[in-house]
Amino acid sequence: MIKFDYRNADALVVGAENGLNLSQEFDEYKDKIAWIIADLNKRKDKPGQWLQWMNLGYSEETVWYVKEYAALVRNRFDNLLVLGIGGSALGGLAVTEALLKPYWNLLSKEQRDGYPRIFFLDNIDPDSINGLLNILDLKKTLINVITKSGDTAETMSQFLIVKDRLEKELGDDYRKNIVATTDKKTGILRQIAEQEGYKTFVVPDDVGGRFSVFSAVGLLPFALLGLDIDEITNGIKDMDLALKNTDIKENIAAQNALIQYLMDTKKGKDISVMMPYSSRLKYVADWYVQLWAESLGKNEDLNGNHVHVGPTPIAALGATDQHSQIQLYNEGPNNKIINFIRVEEFDTILEIPRIFEYTGIGYLGGKTINSLLNAEADSTRVALSDYARPTVTITLPKVDGYNIAQLLYMLEVQTAIAGELYNINTFNQPGVEQAKNYTYALMGRAGYEDSARSLQAKMSLA
Ligand code: PA5
């Protein structure tokens, strides 16, 4: 199991001004946390609660279907191109970057065991879309278009461009190169997929984009890339079982949710930094940023009060950002809580050769890069505590499917518990919808004429 260490968020280590009296806080919040956990587990099967993501680890049917399709198309494609944005892309990016061999796309087909290269087009920069499409052999490329709503402008415009090029290159056969992951009934993509006869997978009801990584949104690309889906679902299930424990002393998601919440609301730490010490976990930090920001940044609480809550998440990478952000974290405003992720065992042990021993870098010889990286994680944590800066540390025994699934699922549950503590709706995103609607209006979508008029008026005022 992954481990969680909160000692450096305690007043005993970082002082009363910046640290929490955690044994007292855990006691004080014991009943509330127990109620929240029990309530989430009670509500999770009810329609409209947006908690179906808590059941994804148990969806044997989805696992079966994604494996079946992956087996069917095995060896047919050299590339997998995922079209999607936000929650439809970030989970896939985080998990594939963590679990595929490093520099996957540069490996030969044999080194990839015949599995395809992977590309996520999660933006609409014309140069990068065009650049990528120019280098991919579309005949050998499987396109997985992912959008829950089925009409997100970024994803659908990518889809239109790719479909057009595919059809021009492949003629009527192009349909075999498209697989759509979307809502089971609604949305324009569902309509198109049915008309055109694409293979489809479902984003289940009551699973929001940022909580969808363990639905077909993530599982399909994982299976197509040869990742061990069972290892992933075992990780989710074991973590789910552990997080059903209503005792805060035993529940790491509840502990960190409470720590992050109290740091923000009591200690003025309204910035939450996610800093893994592993390049393979770089996109886990990006995924966390979206999860935390869209879920907790809310105008209204559940009683309709204007509260404007939400800690600001920041992604950092150890050791790289020690030479970029840590100066600010140590000496700038004391308004952050830093979440370290540390890996105990890497796949590789990389020894530093004993050369230039007579120079000032002689001390490195004979050590491993592994011990250097973890020494840097430890020393940064201690330096931060010397500056009275609170941190918590999540430790992964190693980066594999089981532990990554545990980590992501733990962070999802942590987010849901934090949302309850803030008393907000964790699962909506009205602030995103507003800009989406304005984009539709600007681009002339039918039904958005009023928004277009109000937008034009506002833009000419600006
Ligand atoms: O988490 C969310 O709900 C969002 O980030 C969505 O995933 C994102 O806006 C893309 O939406 P869709 O999957 O409908 O294209």
Image (tube, helix red, strand yellow):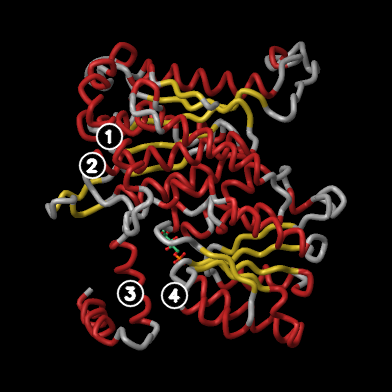
How far apart are the two marked residues, 2 and 1, measured between alpha carbons? 7 Å
Q: Mark 2 or mark 3, which has the lower sequence index?
A: 2
Q: Badge 3 local density, few (<14 within 10 Å), some, or many (20+)?
A: some
Question: Which of labels 2 and 4 is toward the front?
Answer: 4
How far apart are the two marked residues, 4 and 3, measured between alpha carbons? 18 Å
Q: Mark 4 or mark 3, which has the lower sequence index?
A: 4
- Residue denoted by label 2: 422
Q: Quadrant of the C terminus?
A: bottom left
Q: Secondary structure at mark 1?
A: helix
Q: Nearer the viewer, residue 256 or 391?
A: 256
Disc 2 vs disc 1: Cβ atoms closer than 8 Å? yes
- Residue denoted by label 4: 186
Q: Quadrant of the N terminus?
A: top right
Q: Nearer the viewer, residue 124 or 352?
A: 124
* 247 left or right, relative to 235: left
Q: Mark 2 or mark 1, which has the lower sequence index?
A: 1
- Residue denoted by label 1: 261
